Amino acid sequence: MSTQSLFSSLLPTLEKYFGYTAFRENQREIIETILAGQDTLVLMPTGGGKSLCYQIPAILLGGLTVVVSPLISLMKDQVDALRLNGIKAAYLNSSLSPEEQQQVFRQLRQQELKLLYLAPERLIDAENRFITFLKSINTSLLAIDEAHCISQWGHDFRPEYRMLADIRKALDDVPTVALTATADPVTQQDILDKLQLRQPKVFISSFNRENIYYQVAPKRQSYAQLLDFLAERRDQSGIIYVLSRASTEDLAERLTQDGFPAKPYHAKLASQVKEKHQDEFLKDEVPIVVATVAFGMGINKSNVRFVVHMDLPKNIEGYYQETGRAGRDGLASNALLFYSYADVIKLQGFVEVAGNQEQSRVLREKLQQMAIFADLRSCRRKFLLNYFGEEAPDYCGSCDVCRNDYKTFDGTVIAQKALSAVARLGERFGGGYVIDFLRGSKSEKIWQEHKQLKTYGAGADVSKKDWHRYLNDLLRLGYLQKSDDKFPTLQLTEQSWSVLKGQEKVTLVEIAEPEAITIKSSAKPMDEHLFSLLKGLRRQLAQDENVPAYVIFSDATLQEMATYLPTQPEDLPHISGFGEVKIAKYGSAFLDEINQYCTEHDLDSRMSQLRRRSRKKQAAKPKTDTKQRTYDYYQQGKTIAEIARARNLSTNTISTHLAYFVQNGSVDVTKLVDPATITKIEDAIYVHGNRALKPLKDSLDDSISYDEIRLVIAHQHR
Ligand code: ADP
Ligand code: ZN
C-alpha cells in the first residue's frame, strides 16, 4: 500500500479494531511518522494512549512488529486485549512453558502474527540467533516501550535495556519507535543517544491529566474522612497508598470490616499472595488495594477511579506517577492526599542518604517541594505542570484550590512581626523557635537574652497552628527563605526588607477550616443502576475469559451504554470501544441486558442524542484546516504578523500553526527567524531545556519573541 492510502485508512482501522471514533493528541501524527519509516520518540503521560501509536502501524504494515517491554506482568494483558480486538499477537517471556514457546515460534515462521511482545533479555543470545531469526521473518517495526529504562538518569534504569543498542544496530533497516512517560529532558536526550535513533522525530504531549481532580485534606481524623470519601464511591476501584507495610495490612482489614473490601499489597508479602491480590483487583473482584509504593508499576488497569495518599509522598515525581494511575480511561477520577506537617518532619529522616550530602540535599529539596504543593493556595495543576517544565494557566477549575474561594486579607502587620522576629533572632533559628518567640513562650527553650528583644511576645494573639500557616505562606510568597541545612533556619530575602520598611503590602489567606470532601466524580445523566449491572456482566465475561475486566471493556464504554442505552445491533458501532470483533463477541450479551433493563424500567434508548453529539463533534473539528490555511498564506510570502492580521488571529496562534509545519519539515525555520536569533535561542535551550517557553523567554533579550522561540523548538523536534 502506498503511504498515502495507508494514511487514509487510519481512522477506519481505529474504528474497526478498537471501536474508537477519534485519535487523541499526537496519536495520528505519530502513527503517520512511523508509517513513513522514520524513527520516533514519543513522550506521553501515563494513560495518554501510547500503545495505539505502534499497534495501528503494526496492523497496517506487512510483517511483524516487535515490542520490547520490561513489564512481563503486563504482556499477557496486552496480548489478551489485542486478541479480543481480533489482532494476532503473542509474547515470549520466561513465564511460558517450552511447548508454548514452540507454538509462538511456529506462528512467527508462518507469519501469522502482527505483534510480538518480548522482554529485552529474550533478544540476547551468544550468536545473535534470535535477531537473525527476526530478520529472516520480515520484521517491519521495532517498538521500545518504557524507553527511559535505558537511561541511568531515569528513575527506573534497567541494565538489560543497554543491550537494545546492539539490537538497533543488527536490525538497522527497521524503523524504531521509543515510548516513555518520563518527561525529564536529560533522560530524553539519553534515550536518543543510547538507542541511536536516526534523525528521530520527537513528539512531546502535554503531561496534563485533565480528568484527574487533585485535592488535599488536612490529616486529621483521616480514617473518618476516608470513609466519607469511599462512601461516595462505592464499588469503584481505587488504590490507597500508605508509607509502611504494617499499615497496608491494618488499613485493609479495617476497611473490609467497615464494608469496603480491600486487600493489602507490599513487597514483603509472599509472591502468591501478592499475585492473588493484584489479580483480584484487576478482575474487579475486590475494589480497593491498600499498598506501599511497591504497587503500581505494571498495573495497566484503566478504571482506577481514585488514588489516595494517606501519608505524604517523598517527592512530586512519585506523587505524580502514583496519582497518574487513576483514570487511564479518560473518565473523571480523584487524587486525594492527606497532609500534615508532621509527615514532613517524619520523612526528613528517610531522605537522608548516609555519606552523601549532595544527594541528601537534593532529596530534602524535593521533599520541601512536596510540602509546598500540599500547602498550596494556588492551582495545584499549574504547580505540577510547572514543576515538570510545562506552562499552565493560573486556573484549572478542577483542583480543590480552584474550586475554593479563598478569602484574603491585608497581612502586612503579621508579616512585619514575623520578619522582624527572624531579623532580631539573627536568622539563626527554625520556624518552631520563631513561633515560640513570637508567642512569648515561657519555655526554657527560649534563650534568656531573646526574652529581652522587642518582638518577643508580639504575636501572642495568634495560635501556634496559625503562625505555622502564615510562615508557610510567607515562604511561598518569597518573603522568607529556608537555609539548606539539615535543620533549616528561616532567613530574610530582598523582598523582606520592603515589607519591613513599610514599602510593600502583604496579602495573606484567611485561615478557614478546609471544607469536607464533596466532589462527585462525574455529572453525566448516567443510569447508575444499569452501570453496575453492566459491570457485573463484564466481570462475568472476564472470569470466563480469564482476563482483567478492563480488557473486555473500559468503564468509559460501560458508562456510554448506561447513558445512551443502545438497544439495537446497529447502535453498537457508535459506542466507543466496540470494534468489529467485540460487537460480534459481546454485543448481544450487552444488548440483552440493556433491553431487559429498559423494559423493566420503562426507558427508551437515547442513542439519537449520542449520534447528534458525535456529528457535532465532527463538524466542530476542521482543526487541520485552520493550520493549512495559515500555511497557504505563508506560501504566498506573508509574514507571521500579516497572516495574523489577515486571519484575525493572534501571532501566537499563527506561530503555533507554522511550528507544526517547521516540525514536519515543510517550512524552513530560517525563513521565519534570522540565523543570529536562532543561535541565541539554541544556546538558551542548551541551558534551560526546551519544554517550557517562559524560562527561555526570561533568559533572552526582550526583542526575541515567544513566536521565535516556539519555531526554533519545533525545528529541533524535526
Ligand atoms: P499509556 O500506555 O500511554 O499509559 P494506553 O495505551 O494504555 O496508555 O491507553 C490508555 C487507555 O486509553 C486505554 O484504555 C486505551 O484503550 C485508551 N485509548 C487510547 N487511545 C484512545 C483513543 N484514541 N480513543 C479512546 N480511547 C483511547
Ligand atoms: Zn486548579
Image (spheres, rainbow, N blue to C red):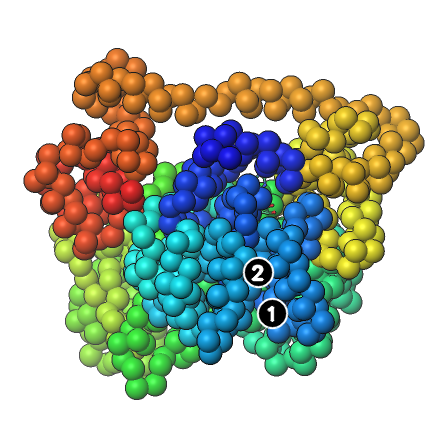
Rendered location of residue 409, percent (x, y): 34, 43
Between residue 416 and residue 270, name the one nearer to us.
270
Between residue 328 and residue 196, name the one nearer to us.
196
Seen at 39% across and 54% down, the residue is: 173
Rendered location of residue 674, percent (x, y): 11, 34
Residue 426: image quadrant is bottom left
Q: Residues within 10 Å of mark 2 (few under 14, many from 20)?
A: many
Residue 260: image quadrant is bottom right
Residue 675: image quadrant is top left
C-alpha distance separating marks 1 and 2: 8 Å
Seen at 60% across and 69% down, the residue is: 93
Between residue 42 and residue 176, name the one nearer to us.
176
Seen at 14% across and 56% down, the residue is: 494
Q: Is residue 145 left or right of residue 244?
A: left
Between residue 464 and residue 46, name the one nearer to us.
46
Check residue 117 in the rendering and tell me which mark sits there, or answer none: 2
What element does badge 2 sit on? strand
Q: Is residue 39 visible?
A: yes
**Residue type (three-letter) at the residue carrying disc 1:** Asn
Q: Is residue 595 left or right of residue 520?
A: right
Seen at 24% across and 21% down, the residue is: 634
What element does badge 1 sit on? loop
Q: Mark 1 near mark 2, Cβ–Cβ under 8 Å?
A: yes
Check residue 246 in the rendering and tell me which mark sits there, or answer none: none
Q: Quadrant of the C terminus?
A: top left
Where is mark 1, residue-wise?
Answer: 93
Q: Please identify the residue farthest to the top as the structure is shown.
A: 646
Q: Is residue 337 visible?
A: no
Rendered location of residue 710, percent (x, y): 25, 38
Up-down: is 693 above or below 180? above
Up-down: is 459 above or below 403? below
**Residue type (three-letter) at the residue carrying disc 2:** Tyr
